[in-house]
Amino acid sequence: MNASEVNRLREQIATLGQSLFDRGLTMGSSGNISVRLDDGGWLMTPTNACLGRLDPQRISRLDRSGRLLEGDKPTKEQFLHTAMYEERPQSGAIVHLHSTHSVAVSCLPDINPCDCIPPLTAYYVMRVGRLPLVPYHMPGDPELGDAVRGLAGEHSAVLLANHGPVVAGKNLEAAVYATEELEETAKLFLLLRGENPRALTPEQVAALEQRFPRD
Ligand SMILES: [Zn+2]
């Protein structure tokens, strides 16, 4: 990966970060984005940075052991990203947000921890699939990384209880689209609570998974 490709990815992180921020999917300095580089390292958004105003050149560049090579210090949630990448060699990017509707679902007492949101739409099944809940941990608790690692092999997206989603994709665009699909489906799920909505049947879900396999 040459320097201009790395710069293109820096610009893409800043553009998509601003897009997420401008649409209210992330607030303040919460949320973080990472992209895997082909030298085994990563670009990662810096600690205390607002995704709406990222300076592409200050985005952290890490080597394959997670050491900072360029830019500002990376997000304190770096370990969430690393845990997910370790189990998902096919994933090229990760988005973690504290997006309101997804966080709301993560606080509900009666959701299925193996599958937090029912398969309400085909695009949710195609982009997110079955979403497990990771039990609550204090921010920065290394056991949270272990809990994510335990689920990431089977799932491209996990929902951290009382915290927010962590979503992987084959590239940054795919990870952002999946995060948006999850947030919109969380909104639908909350709108429909108490309505006994008709979700897709297990047969319909199986047919989608066969036709549109996720990474
Ligand atoms: Zn977080």
Image (cartoon, rainbow, N blue to C red):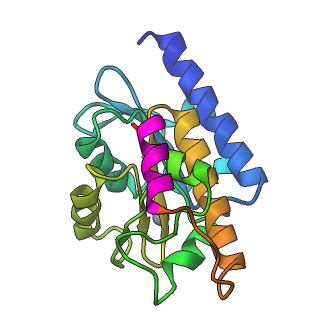
Q: Position of residue 11 (x, y in %)?
A: 63, 27
The part of the image, by quadrant, that contains residue 173 is: top right
| Residue at 44 percent of width and 61 percent of height | 202
Foreground pick, 1 / 61: 1
Q: Would you say residue 212 sits in the magenta stretch?
A: yes
Q: Position of residue 3 (x, y in %)?
A: 48, 12
Q: How many marks?
A: 0
Foreground pick, 186 / 149: 186
Q: Would you say residue 81 sits in the magenta stretch?
A: no
Q: Is 199 rendered above or below residue 81?
A: below
| Residue at 28 percent of width and 40 percent of height | 66
Left or right position of 11 against 155:
right
Q: Start and end of the magenta stretch?
A: 202-214
Predominant SS along the magenta part: helix
Q: Position of residue 165 (x, y in %)?
A: 49, 62
In the image as oriented, which residue stretches furthest toward the right?
22
In the image as oriented, which residue stretches furthest toward the front?
203
Is the N terminus in the top left, top right, bottom left or bottom right quadrant?
top left
Q: Is 163 rendered above or below residue 82?
A: below
| Residue at 51 percent of width and 14 percent of height | 5
Is the C terminus in the top left, top right, bottom left or bottom right quadrant?
top left
Q: Position of residue 45 (x, y in %)?
A: 51, 44
Q: Is residue 100 visible?
A: no
| Residue at 32 percent of width and 30 percent of height | 41
Left or right position of 124 against 27:
left
Q: Is residue 185 visible?
A: yes
Left or right position of 105 against 90:
right
